[in-house]
Amino acid sequence: MKPRIAERVGQLPAYPLAHIPRLKRELLAKGVDIIDLGAGDADFMPPQVALDSLKAALAKPAMHRYGFQIGLAAFREAIVRYHRRRFGTDLDAATEVAPLIGSKEGICHFAQAMCGPGDVAIVPEPGYACYIGGTVLAGATPHIVPLTGKNNFLVELADVPKDVLTKTRIVFLNYPNNPTAAVAPKDYLARTVAICREHGIVLCYDNPYCEITFDGYIAPSIFEVDGAREVAVEFHSMSKSFSMTGWRVAWAIGNRDLLAALTVVKTFTDTGPFLALQQASADVLEQAESLVRKPVAEFAARRDTMVKALKKAGFEVPVPKATLYLWVPLPEGLEAAEFATTLLKDEGVIVLPGTGFGKSAEGYFRIALTVPGARLEEAADRMGRVLARA
């Protein structure tokens, strides 16, 4: 008899990046000049302090032991100091902070700690794949909320049917947003927290792009909203702001009871991030504000270069206030998957079609600003050629 795979595995949607590496390898083998604007993985080196700190930590035997869920005290304390400086948030390092092996891991496990069969999770679409992935793996039911320009790409809980809200255990929010680059006003966050408190809904606030902001905009923490500590956990990462994507170090902060539940789940699945990586991350966080200036300035310059080049190529594109992405609308009638596939096969440019993040994101594609300006201009020219032929 053939072994059976769990039904919930078959319920998982296709991951938006899963097929890209294979196609990229095939085209590179044929000599195609590929410009990869798919993954949100910038071409910057990590801060020098991270490299120096890691090198020093590697020489210490204690850094090679299990970290377990408590992790490195220095990392927890650096997180507390960073949040106090950046957001004015006072946290208890022992109970209101949790080290993670990347925020993706933490969010997926958090969903499993918060909900199960019979429960509902409110999932934005388009959105990061681990929101729906964690929901499905928990056995809960996702309630998809389309993010559109009409609602400013915000999840408005007041518009969710009351019978859904009564079953909802968790809502996933991500601002500044991937992939739309939308930002959330403070009054929106306040009314969202109020509804979560009213209905006993856990608020999973995914905030890895809070430092990548432009034109004077400053992204908030959910804990700048009164009452959020009762219902929320916020996720942060070393990946995007500090160009440490492959290091897989992140953290969650917030309600101690919710974090305790997450810690229980993680106790059965991992033994925490490598301690030497936690030490390097701690040293980076002590200088976070100064270390982000250079990459953020480069992202801003790339944003401006690409917006100008796209407009010249025939696209209308909003100018985002945050993130390393552009969320580009296509002319009516041009399907996102068709455009992205043609762009890759005919012109060697990788972008992500909106439908890779969910069917309600038809009509858009995402650009990651992960290559220098000259390559972005070349990519825009190639996109314009595909648009002209469509």
Image (cartoon, grey):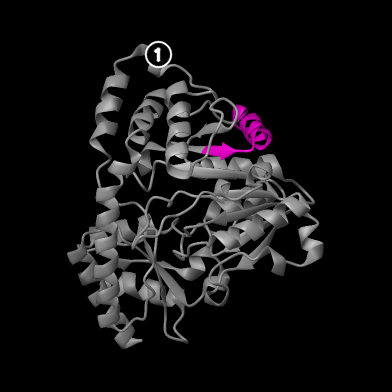
Magenta stretch contains residue 159? no
- Residue at 30% x, 84% y: name it: 314
Along the line of sight, the residue nearer the viewer: 159 or 314 = 159
In the figure, residue 372 lies in which quadrant?
Answer: bottom left
- Residue at 39% x, 44% y: name it: 239
- Residue at 29% x, 58% y: name it: 299
Coordinates of residue 384 in the picture (x, y in percent): 28, 80
The segment highlighted magenta reads: 252-268
Magenta stretch contains residue 260? yes
The residue furthest left is: 374
Along the line of sight, the residue nearer the viewer: 77 or 118 = 77
In the figure, residue 349 lies in which quadrant?
Answer: bottom left
Residue receiving disc 1: 62
State whether residue 81 is above or below residue 351. above
- Which amino acid, mark 1? Ala
In the figure, residue 47 lies in which quadrant?
Answer: top left
Query: On the picture, is 171 further left or further right than 270?
Result: right
Coordinates of residue 192 in the picture (x, y in percent): 65, 58
Query: On the picture, is 103 further left or further right than 320?
Result: right
Q: Quadrant of the N terminus?
A: top right
Query: On the picture, is 40 further left or further right than 170?
Result: left
Q: Quadrant of the C terminus?
A: bottom left
Considering the whole magenta stretch, tell me its main secondary structure: helix
Coordinates of residue 322 in the picture (x, y in percent): 39, 60
Q: How many marks?
A: 1
State whether residue 30 is above or below residue 170. below
Coordinates of residue 270 in the picture (x, y in percent): 55, 29
